[in-house]
Image (cartoon, helix red, strand yellow):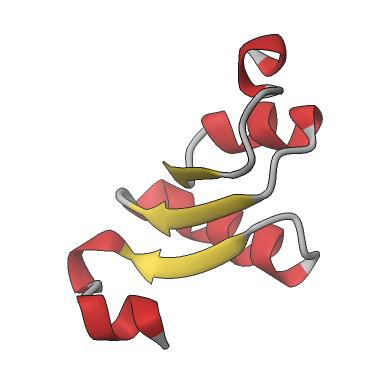
């Protein structure tokens, strides 16, 4: 999968296992939580600078993304 992602300038994804593929490929990521088990992945990757977390997808609005 990383070889398929290597062309991307960035990726927007749920904070599931695809995050690890993107991190391995070195692709900048914007992640969101779509299931409870993804909250820790989103928080940790955001904290270490591997991704920018938007938080829970169900809570997103155009205004919250723009901020």
Figure check: 40 above or below 6: below
Quadrant (top left/top right/bottom left/bottom right) for the C terminus: bottom left
Towards the viewer: 55 or 36: 55
Quarter-of-image position of residue 13:
top left
Give residue 54's position: percent from left, percent from top. Answer: 44, 69
Tell me if 13 is positioned left or right of 35 in this view.
right
Residue at point 76%, 28% (across, down): 25
Quadrant (top left/top right/bottom left/bottom right) for the N terminus: top right
Residue at point 60%, 50% (across, down): 29
Tell me if 6 is positioned left or right of 39 in this view.
right
Give residue 32's position: percent from left, percent from top. Answer: 41, 57
User: Number of callouts in the render?
Assistant: 0
Quarter-of-image position of residue 22:
top right
Residue at point 68%, 49% (across, down): 28
Give residue 40's position: percent from left, percent from top. Answer: 56, 58
Figure check: 15 above or below 58: above
Residue at point 54%, 30% (across, down): 18
Figure check: 10 above or below 45: above
């Amino acid at each position: 999968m990383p070889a398929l992602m290597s062309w991307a300038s960035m990726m927007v994804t749920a904070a599931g296992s695809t995050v690890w593929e993107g991190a391995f490929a070195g692709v900048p990521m914007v992640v969101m939580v779509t299931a409870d088990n993804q909250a820790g992945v989103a928080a940790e990757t955001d904290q270490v600078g591997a991704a920018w977390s938007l938080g829970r997808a169900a809570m997103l609005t155009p205004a919250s993304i723009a901020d």
